Amino acid sequence: MKAILMSIRPQHLVNILNGKKTIELRKRLPSDYRGWVYCYCTKTKPYITQQSKSQFTIRETKDFTNLINGKVVCRFWVDNVEEIDTNLGHPSIYVKACVQDQEAIEYGKGKMVKVISISKLEIFDKPKKLGEFYYYKKRLIDCGRDCPPYVDEVKTQVRKAPQSWQYIYIEEDK
């Protein structure tokens, strides 16, 4: 099954995990995408620690107990992706996205921004490492002298976090 792996900064991800943020804003994402989005917490400050299954806290110093930065901690379902012009102002959307009006305007820089509604949030009991996910990469396959090289898609382990997002493939619904 095709899914999306999305990098999210800790200050935004903690709001998703705690149920405050119900909308994610992105400059780029396929408008026709429907499916799971897996959330990777970037390694930058601040740091997020997990207090319980549903309570997450921001810290300025590394607390190596239950630290979730650098891991995939949850997934949510996307039914619909809309577009808005941040210059027109959308206060109700900004509140749900946990951003100030000016932040949204600066982020959008006068262009259209994708509005992703977060539903069916599932927080993993144990955060996952990037290496547990795969994508398909086109590679040139050389089969020897008797046949010409050809291009095929090869299952490849995710080794580094995407700048914004990337497609991944999930073998089973976990």
Image (spheres, grey):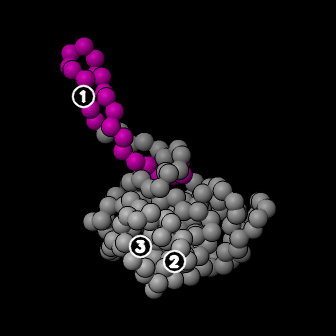
Q: Quadrant of the C terminus?
A: bottom left
Front residue of 147/113: it is 113
Q: Pointer 2: what residue?
A: 101
Asked if 68 appears above or below 55 in the picture, the reply is above
Q: Position of residue 148 (x, y in %)?
A: 21, 20
Q: Quadrant of residue 98?
A: bottom right
Q: Secondary structure at mark 2?
A: helix
Which residue appears at 47% of the width and 59% of the height? Answer: 6
Q: CA distance from mark 2 to mark 3?
A: 9 Å
Type of amino acid at the residue the image marks with label 3 = Asn
Q: Quadrant of residue 49?
A: bottom right
Q: Position of residue 53 (x, y in %)?
A: 63, 77
Type of amino acid at the residue the image marks with label 2 = Asp
Q: Pointer 1: what residue?
A: 150
Which residue appears at 31% of the width and 28% of the height? Answer: 140
Residue at the far top in the pictured view: 145
- Which is closer to the viewer, label 1 or label 3? 3
